[in-house]
Amino acid sequence: MIGLMPGIALKHLLARRRQSLVSLSGIVLGVAFFLAVSALMQGSENDFIRRLVDNSPHITIQDEFRNPRLQPVEQLYPSGAVEVRRVKPLTETRGIRGYPQILEGLRTEPSLRASPVLAGQALVSFAGKDIAVSLNGMIPAEVNDVSTIQNYMTAGNVDALTVNPDGIILGDALARKLSLALGENVTVTAPTGEVHTFKILGLFHTGRADYDNTQTFADLKRVQALLKRLNRANTIIMKLDDPQRAHAVADGIERRFGYKTVSWQEANEDLMSTLTTRNIIMYTVVSAVLIVAAFGIYNVISTVVLEKQRDIAILKSTGFRARDIRRIFLIQGLLLGFAGSALGLPFGAGLMLVLMQVRLKFPGSSDPVPLPIDWNWPQFAIAVAFAMGAALCAGLLPARKAASVQPVDILRGAQ
Amino acid sequence: MTEAMIEAEGLTRRLAGEVAVTLVEDASLAVHRGEFVAITGASGSGKSSLLYLLGLLDRPTSGQLWLHGRETATLEEDALAGLRLAELGFVFQFHFLLPEFSALENVMLPMRRLGRLPQPEIAARAAELFSSLGLAGEAKKLPRQLSGGQSQRVAIARALANDPLLILADEPTGNLDTTASANVQTILMDLAHRYDRAVVVVTHDRDFAAAADRVIVMSDGRIRGE
């Protein structure tokens, strides 16, 4: 049997069925939209980070320094008042000096895989068409350890570069532009004037139009020769077993080798802060729906309190305490919150299922993709907690008002 | 004479404001078990205000009030509510039944709040009260489905639910026809004389007052005589 106070609270709500339903629907919609929107936002954020982590190096050592390099005299007298004027850096071939030694040092760490890359600009020419591309020289045997490009191959494969160092891998969009196909030869011209003919050994399709149109991969030695930067690499890219450690590991590498070392978090700092801002905006907007719903609950409970002044007086005169009365009206809020949550959760889950069926073609993407939806129990718990909290707060003021009713004032007026 | 069920000494109730209003002034009285006392007087004479003071619904500005020998002036609101629940029963001019609850549920409410009896016994006692008040067939009806007399008898059943020793009634027949009025009068007198309860009734009805063991006459907030 239902408890005394919940029983009275329920009777009050059922007596005002239409008004209760309206305020209930506010909570239902609030909970449902909270769930759907948060799942969508969470999904897109996770998807974005997953792509970021999967498709880009976790750590990149660049051929530059975060701060200007110290002159030998400054290193010798670190606390001295040294001023060196008219320092002119030597003209030297750009790149990471002694990268094989750095790689050797890095490879002592078992949870880390590293590989050198020499990237530069080049011109791909075929049938009278020239297209500027980014030419990435890599060690073919190591590519799969540090890059996910193999996952996006639509023809050929990366390993073919090991067998034929004069091969090249292109994006399918670029190949289409130049009317090229697997196995055909293409001419690549470097800014140095060097020209080399490569055989197309693979085509990839990532779905990111910019990437598919501009990125090419070839053997490191061939690219070094083409760019006239022998024994140089301008980046060392790394993957970690645990991408979340990237920031700390990058700090350690930079301290050890001096070269600017950037973790994926640092490289995408602006995007990550945008995600945080986006989340704040989303939660504010969705919370506003529940706050509006809470006003609906406040309205219905306030009305009940006003209408039930005489009943409250009678309950108090028969021995109900002020806190019993307060409890009755708080329970009304909670009942609406509970019912709203109970109905809102399946409604929200339904909305999520519908959203999961939606496929959209985003700008920069060549294929329609399903909306990323991530749902988990904490989201459901937060939605319920928020709804219950809003409902409880909405019941608080009317409940206090009800508890303060003096029966004698009402009974005198009723005589 | 038995111990006084309720005893008042110099009870005064004033409403503060720009012009202070005295509702009850220096009222002293005692009501014993088995006694049926009527309070009469013109409208505005302070009868109902005195009843509210005796029923612990209002606090006196000055004076003392003992319920069953226990001083009540210093008690907290919760303690007063507890006394109202366990030891007092109220009947008002209008039945004031809760409209969403059936007649039986209305009577069960104080018993459920007190929590002395398990649920089946509460239902059994409520049914017994209904039967003794001639309401056996009305238990499941909502208040709006009952006549005035039936509603008032349900209100009496609610007042008796926790088996109180003191019953306070404010114009209980004021809204009833002659037959229903006589019926209610008989019930209240029986409670005093057959069941040894103390019953205090505020009434305008001279016949009703004449049937009481004692009649307290009030005017201008003062007890003028018995």
Image (tube, rainbow, N blue to C red):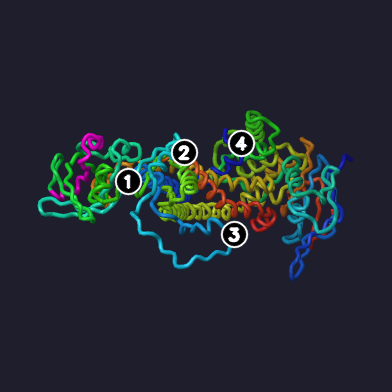
Which residue sits furthest left? A127
Q: Quadrant of residue B187?
A: top right
Question: What amino acid does circle 2 point to?
Answer: Trp
Tell me the residue that label 3 is attached to. A79
Question: What amino acid does circle 4 point to?
Answer: Leu
Q: Is residue A363 visible?
A: no
**Viewer-proximal residue among A10 and B109:** A10
Q: Is residue B104 above or below residue B24?
A: above
Question: What amino acid does circle 3 point to?
Answer: Ser
**Residue B94 screen position, x and y as percent:** 63, 50
Residue A231: mark in rendering: 1
Q: Is residue A181 left or right of residue A60?
A: left
- Respond whether the residues carrying marks 4 and 3 are from the same subunit: no
Circles 2 and 3 in contact, beta carbons < 8 Å: no
Callout 4: SS: loop
Q: Is residue B33 left or right of residue A335?
A: right
Tell me the residue that label 2 is attached to. A377
Q: CA distance from mark 4 to mark 2?
A: 54 Å
Q: Residues within 10 Å of mark 2 (few under 14, many from 20)?
A: few
**Residue B76 screen position, x and y as percent:** 77, 49
Q: Chain of mark 4?
A: B
Where does the C terminus of chain A fall, quadrant-wise? Answer: bottom right
Tell me the residue that label 4 is attached to. B135
- Respond whether the residues carrying marks 1 and 3 are from the same subunit: yes
Residue extent of the magenta highlight = A158-178
- If you read the primary sequence from the N terminus, does the residue marked by circle 1 or circle 3 appear first? 3
Q: Nearer the viewer, mark 2 or mark 1?
A: 1
Q: CA distance from mark 4 to mark 3?
A: 103 Å
Q: Nearer the viewer, mark 4 or mark 1?
A: 1
- If you read the primary sequence from the N terminus, does the residue marked by circle 2 or circle 3 appear first? 3
